[in-house]
Amino acid sequence: PGVAPAASFATQVLAFGEKGSGPGLFDDPRYVAVDGAGNIYVGDYQDGRVQIFDGQGQFQRQINIGDSILRGMAVSPGGDLYLAYDGGVNLYNSNGQTQGALAYDGSIDSLALGADGSLYAVTDGETLLRFDPDGGLTLEIPDAISSISKDSELDTQVAVDGLGNIYALGTFNSAVFKFDPEGNFL
C-alpha cells in the first residue's frame, strides 16, 4: 500500500490480427517494420507472406513470395521492401511489384536499413555486410561475433542506428555487439 508500481518500459497502443492464414491473420510472424507513412509490414516466417496494414492495423494488401522461408525484412521510408529469402535479397516497390535482386554471391539472412539508405545484412551466420543504396558492398566484418567472443555464432540479427552504428545480436552468445560505421568493435 502506498507504493506506486514502477513505470513500464513500453505501453501497448495497438494490437491486431489473430492466428490463421487469411488476410490480416498470422501464421508465424517474425518480422515487423514501419514505413514513413506509418504503414505496418508483417512478415510470416514460413508461409511466404508479407502483409501491409495501415497505421490503425487495418489490412491493406499482401505480397506473396511462394513457399520460401522469410529470413529477413526491411522497409524504406517510401515503402520499398527488402526481403531475404532463398539465400538472396529481393526488392519490391511499395505496390508489391518485384524490382530485382541484390547481386551478392552468398546466402543472406537478417536485414536492416540505415538512415542513409544503406542495407545491412548478415551472411555465414555472423559476417556483417553493408551495401550502398545502389547495391555496392561497402563494408564487410567477417566473423563479427566469434572474432570477439571466441565462441561460434550461427544466428546473428542486425540493426543500425541513425548514426550508422551497427548492432549485432548473437543469439547463441546471448549478447549484443556494437560496431562503429567503419566496422570497429566498440
Image (cartoon, rainbow, N blue to C red):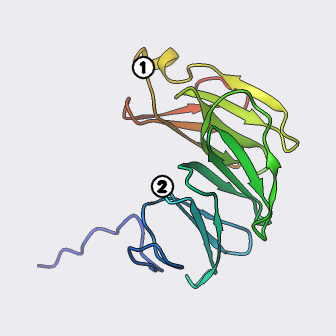
To which residue does mark 2 refer?
Answer: 46
Asked if the residue under mark 1 is in contact with the one under mark 2, i.e. CB atoms within 8 Å, the reply is no
Of residue 140 and residue 71, the one placed in the foreground of this image is 71
140 left or right of 169? right
User: Percent from the top left, x then y, of residue 55?
Assistant: 62, 80
Q: Is residue 49 above or below residue 87?
A: below
Q: Quadrant of residue 135?
A: top right
Q: Please, what is the three-letter code of the amino acid marked with disc 1?
A: Ser
To which residue does mark 1 refer?
Answer: 152
Mark closer to the chain start, 2 or 1: 2
- Secondary structure beneath disc 1? loop
What is the total number of numbered labels drawn onto the structure image? Answer: 2
Q: Is residue 82 visible?
A: yes
Which image quarter holds the N terminus?
bottom left
Of residue 17 and residue 166, the one placed in the foreground of this image is 17
Q: Residue shown at 54%/79% (left/top)?
A: 23
Instruction: Give me the C-alpha separation between circle 2 and circle 1.
Output: 26 Å
8 left or right of 21? left
Q: Residue shown at 80%/66% (left/top)?
A: 78
Q: Which mark, residue 140?
A: none
* Front position among marks 2 and 1: 2
Instruction: Give the crowd class for mark 2: few <14, some 14-19, many >=20 residues within 10 Å.
Output: some
Q: Please, what is the three-letter code of the amino acid marked with disc 2?
A: Gln
User: Percent from the top left, x then y, of residue 136?
Assistant: 85, 33
Q: Quadrant of residue 164?
A: top right
User: Percent from the top left, x then y, of residue 22?
Assistant: 49, 77
